[in-house]
Image: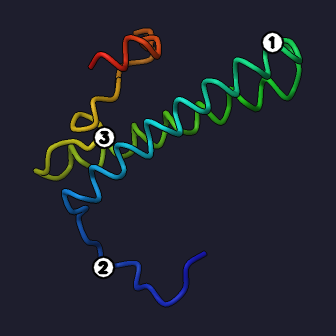
């Protein structure tokens, strides 16, 4: 937990920070997908290691959804839209990594 920061003071991301966040989230997403593939291949779909790898990917998706929700509440363009991330209802499938790279 961070100390010395007043929680009621919020500062919007700068364009440089948005660009860095876009790059960082894309890198994290790619690595998590690769880790999940390896964990499923090595341990099987029912193993707790593979399940936990999927949960981490789910946590990243929830982070992106929360960023989207916060951006919709403000008039600032969505960081997820800006970053080109797939934000969809649960019924829509996520694109493959190759499809996401073409966005």
Circle 2 Cα neighbour tier, 10 Å, few/some/many (<14 / 14–19 / ≥20): few
The location of residue 49, given as percent across then percent down, is 84, 29
The location of residue 76, given as percent across then percent down, is 13, 51
Nearest to N terminus: mark 2 or mark 1: 2
Q: Which residue is mark 3?
A: 68
Give whichever of 80, 27 is nearer the camera.
Answer: 27
**Real-space Cα distance between discs 2 and 1?**
45 Å
Q: Are marks 3 and 2 in contact (CB under 8 Å)?
A: no
Q: Which mark is residue 41?
A: 1
Disc number lying in front (1 or 3): 1
Q: Residue at the spot x=21%, y=38% of the render?
A: 82
Circle 1 Cα neighbour tier, 10 Å, few/some/many (<14 / 14–19 / ≥20): few
**If the image is split into quadrants, where does the N terminus sit?**
bottom right
Q: Using residue 29 as the reference point, say whether residue 67 is left or right of it.
A: left
Q: Which mark is residue 91?
A: none
Quick one: which residue is furthest to the left in this view?
75
Question: Which color scheme does this rendered protein use?
Answer: rainbow
The location of residue 38, given as percent across then percent down, is 76, 20
Q: Using residue 90 as the reference point, say whether residue 67 is left or right of it.
A: left
In this picture, is 43 found above or below 75? above
Circle 3 Cα neighbour tier, 10 Å, few/some/many (<14 / 14–19 / ≥20): some
The location of residue 12, given as percent across then percent down, is 23, 64
Q: Using residue 94 as the reference point, say whether residue 52 is left or right of it.
A: right
Give whichever of 59, 30 is nearer the camera.
Answer: 30
Q: Quadrant of residue 15?
A: bottom left
**Real-space Cα distance between discs 3 and 2?**
20 Å
Q: Which residue is mark 2?
A: 9
Q: Residue at the spot x=36%, y=50% of the render?
A: 21
Quick one: which residue is furthest to the bottom in this view?
4
**Real-space Cα distance between discs 1 and 3?**
32 Å
Q: Secondary structure at mark 1?
A: helix
Q: Quadrant of residue 33?
A: top right
């Amino acid at each position: 937990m961070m100390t010395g920061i007043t929680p009621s003071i919020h500062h919007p991301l700068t364009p440089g920070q948005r660009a860095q966040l876009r790059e960082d989230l894309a890198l994290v997403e790619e690595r998590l997908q690769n880790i999940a593939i390896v964990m499923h291949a090595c341990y099987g779909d029912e193993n707790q290691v593979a399940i936990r790898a999927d949960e981490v990917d789910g946590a990243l998706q929830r982070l992106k959804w929360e960023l989207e929700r916060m951006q919709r509440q403000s008039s600032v363009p969505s960081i997820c839209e800006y970053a080109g991330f797939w934000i969809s209802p649960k019924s829509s499938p996520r694109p493959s990594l190759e499809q996401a790279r073409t966005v």
